[in-house]
Amino acid sequence: MKLKTALMGAVATVAFAPMAFADAHEGERGRDGEVKIIYWQAPSILNPFLSGGTKDVESSSLVIEPLARYDPQGELIPWLVDEVPTVSNGGVSEDLMSITWKITEGILWSDGTPFTSADVKFTYEYCTHPESGCAQATKFEGVSSVETPDDLTVVVSFENPTPFPYGPFVGGESPIIQAAQFADCMGARAPECTDQNFGPIGTGPFVVTEFRTNDVIQLVANENYRDPNKPAFASVTFKGGGDATAAGRAVMETGEFDYAWNLQLAPDVIASMEAGGLGVPVAGFGPLVERIMLNNTNPDPSLSAEERSVIRPHPFLSDPAVYKAMSMAIDRPLLVEVGYGQAGKVTCNWVPAPEAVNSDTFTCDVQDIDGANAMLDAAGIVDTDGDGIREKDGVPLRVLYQTSTNAVRQDFQALIKEWWSEIGIEAELRNIDASVFFGGDPGSPDTFQKFYADVEMYANTFNGTDPQSYLGNGLCAQAPSPATQWQGENISRFCDEEYDALHAQLIQTADASERAAIARQLNDIIVDRGGMIPLVHRGRLSAHANSLGGIDLNVWDTELWNAADWYRIGDNR
C-alpha cells in the first residue's frame, strides 16, 4: 500500500571478498553484466550516519536500505516491511505516541544472516549515542525508545504525540546497519571503523568488493537479495571525481558510463552533450536549493578549532543590515539564466517544495544595489578610510567565500563578488574539491561542516515531502563541533530559541495545513535572522545512457533508489 505524507505537494583502499552469482541469462540475477555509474563528487564513506554529503548517502543506498522510502511521486512505500504503519491500519497508536513496523519475513543480510528488529534497534542506539556525532540525528528527534517485542517487530515510541512518525528508518538518509558488523563501532569509535564504514553489509541489491575513497567503488550483485531475479546487473563500477562536464560527456557523448549524477552545468552545455546521441538528461524539481550559508560564529584562524565553532557572534555577519544588504545585491534571475536555465528558479526560501511549505513572505527577484547601500549607510556601516570597504565597529567587511569546485559555482562566486564590491564588501574566493568539501573526515579543515570561512555556498535537499527532520537542521543542538566529531547539519551554527520552540511544536502538530504554516514560519525565521541567503531552487539533473532501462528519477529519495530494477536495453553486454 502507499501512504501520502502529511505535507503533500591520500586515498585509502579496502578490499572485500567477492560474492558469487548465477550465470547470466535472461530472467536471472546478473544477466546484464556491468553497469557503470559516475558521480563527479566522489564518495568518501559508505556510512551516511557519518557524513551529511549527498554523494555518500546516494552511493551507500546501493548497499544499505531503510524500512520504507519515498517513490518518485513523493508517496511513502514499504521497503523492508509488509506495509507502512498508519493509524487506520493499527500501526500507529491512536494517541500518536508510537509506531510499530512489521519487518517482512525472510529478508537476509548480504552475508546470509537474518535481518531482524535487533538491527533496527541497534541503528537507533548507534546514531543517538552521545559520543557518536551522528550526521542524521534529526531523524530521531523526539524518540524516547526503540523496542523489539520479537525478531520481526519494531516499536518506536516518542516523548510526545507525534503526528508524523516517519523520521526514523525512512528514506535513504536513515537506513539500517547490521548490529553484528558495527557492534564495536559505537560512540567515539565510529569514525575509526574503516572496514565497516567502507564496506557495510547490507540488504540492498549490491555488495562492496573494493572501496577507494574519493575514487572508485566496485560492487557485485547481492546473492542473498530478496528478489531472485534482481539485480539484472552482475557488477557495478561506481566512479567518483573529476567534474560535471566530464561526467556528462562520459554518458551522452562517449558512452563510457551509463549514469551520471548531478550535472550542474549551463543549459547550452547540456544541449550540446545530448546532441552526442548516446544518452539523455533527466530532470525533476524537488526541494533542492543552492544557498549561501552565513557563519554565525567567528572563523578567525587565530582561534583554536574548538573556539572557532562556538564563539558568537560573528564580527559583522550577525548584523541584519549586513546580510540583508548582501542578499539585496544579488541578481538571482541572472544566476538562474547563467547557471541553470529551465532547471532553475529564483527562490528566497530554504524550503521551496512541496508547494504547501513554500513561503511567500520575501521577495528577492529584483537586484537592488542602491537599496543595499542605503541600508548599510543607515546602519552606520560605512567606509571610513576610503579604501572602498565598509567597516562595522572598526572591522572591515571582508569575507572568505568558499564553495566546491564546479564551473557553475565559480561563475556564481565571480558574479556575487562583483555585486558585493558595489556595496563595499570585499570577498576572497576559495573553492575546494567537492569530494573533500562534502566529505565527512573529522580531521580535514576543508569540509563544509567545519566551515572555516565567513560564507559558503552549496545545495542540499531532503528525503520525502515532509520537511520536519530537514528543518530540524536549524536547531541549536545540531551544530557541528569537536564534541560531535564535526557531524551535524546546522552548518551555519544558527541558534534561536523561538526557532527551537516552534520546531518542537511542529513535531506535535497533526493538521496538514497547520504543519505547513509552521514549516513556513521556520523557513522565514532562519532566512530573516541570518542563517542563510537562498539563491536558486534547482531541479535535479542527471543523465543516463540510451541503453540503460528502468531509470525513474526520484527527487524525494536517492536517485539510486531503484537500482535493483535497472537493466540493459538491446544487448546483454
Image (tube, grey):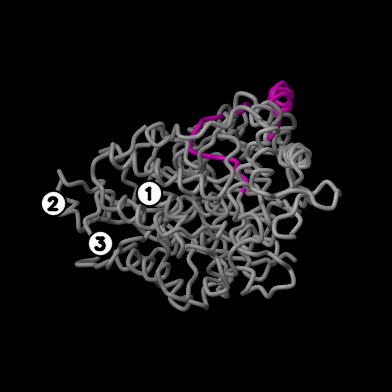
Q: Nearer the viewer, residue 95 or 528?
A: 528
Task: Indicate which disc, 1 or 2, sits on the residue closer to the N terminus.
Answer: 2
Crowding at mark 3 (Cα within 10 Å: few <14, some 14-19, many 20+): some
Residue, disc 2: 94
Q: Left or right? Give the position of 569 relative to 564.
A: right
Q: Left or right? Give the position of 160 relative to 176.
A: left
* Residue type at the position of mark 1: Gln
Asked if residue 496 can be seen in this view, the reply is yes
Q: Left or right? Give the position of 71 relative to 340.
A: left
**Which stretch is magenta?**
264-292
Residue 356 has which mark?
none
Q: Left or right? Give the position of 92 relative to 169.
A: left
Q: Position of residue 390 (x, y in %)?
A: 76, 50
Q: Nearer the viewer, residue 8 or 366?
A: 366
* Residue type at the position of mark 2: Glu
Residue 381 vs 540, above or below: the answer is: below
Residue, disc 1: 468
In which quarter of the view is residue 516 placed?
top left
Task: Indicate which disc, 3 or 2, sits on the residue closer to the N terminus.
Answer: 2
Task: Indicate which disc, 3 or 1, sits on the residue closer to the N terminus.
Answer: 3
Give the secondary structure at mark 2.
loop
Q: Position of residue 64 (x, y in %)?
A: 45, 56
- Location of the C terminus (image quadrant): top right
Residue 158 has which mark?
3
Q: Nearer the viewer, residue 223 or 388?
A: 388
Q: Position of residue 233 (x, y in %)?
A: 54, 43
